[in-house]
Image (spheres, rainbow, N blue to C red):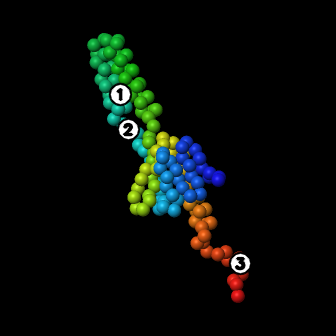
Amino acid sequence: MELPFNEAGVSVTRTALSAAGQVFPLRDIDDMRIVPGQRKRTVPIALSLIGVAGAAVGGAYGSGAGLACGVMLVVVGWLAWIWQEAPHQLIVVTGGESREAVWSADLVFLERVERAVRSAKAASTASSPGAEPSASRPAAQ
């Protein structure tokens, strides 16, 4: 059986989405949405402010160690902001209930998963036995 999508522990088949030990049948999925995450500001800003205060006190009292430690804390706060990953979520709505299906720091990956699920769902509804007969066949008389 061919897997339309299988990457990083997430599989999308013709019948289901499987991620993080959860299986969502495609027929039960009503909707999907990606919730982009935000970076947290508290720790980087707190580190930088403590560093600025330490550098100011160290500079005012002529303490090289205080100045150096303050500057290092400012740099650590800046690095904490730069390297911080924002958690993005793929939310699947089944039976009117929203559930987190996939969590990733890579927004592009979640968009690929969403596209794969939507295309597999469209393919499964197009090939379902209850689909309308083709208009190209002549009607029986």
**Image quadrant of residue 50?**
top left
Q: Along the polypeptide, which appears first: circle 1 or circle 3?
A: 1
Count of numbered circles on the image: 3
Q: Tell me the distance, in whole angstroms, between the alpha carbons under discs 3 and 2.
A: 60 Å
Mark 3 burial class by Cα count in 10 Å: few <14, some 14-19, many 20+: few
Please name the amino acid that badge 1 sits on: Ser
**Amino acid at dot 3:** Arg
For the point 28% across and 18% down, the residue is: 57
- In the rendered view, does 137 fall on the left or right side of 91? right
> Decide: marks 1, 3 in contact (CB < 8 A)?
no
| Residue type at tag 2 | Lys
Q: Secondary structure at mark 3?
A: loop
Label 2 secondary element: loop
x 28%, y 16%: residue = 60
3 with respect to 49 (left or right): right
Residue at which label 3 appears? 137
Q: Is disc 1 surrounded by few (<14), some (14 to 19) or many (20+) residues within 10 Å?
A: many
Disc 1 element: helix
Image quarter (top left, top right, bottom left or bottom right) of the C terminus: bottom right
Question: Does 14 appear above or below 87?
Answer: below
The residue to which callout 1 is attached is 48
Does residue 9 sit above or below 128 in this rendering? above
Residue drawn at point x = 34 percent, y = 13 percent: 65
At horizontal 32% and vertical 15% (from top left) the residue drawn is: 66
Residue neighbourhood size for the residue with mark 2, other residues' Cα within 10 Å, grouped as few (<14), some (14–19), many (≥20)? few
Mark 2 vs 1, N-terminal side = 2
Q: CA distance from mark 2 to mark 1?
A: 14 Å
| Residue 81 seen in this snapshot | yes
What x and y, as percent, mark residue 123? 61, 62
Residue 7: x and y, percent? 58, 44
Residue, disc 2: 40
Indicate which label's residue lies in the foreground, 1 or 3: 3
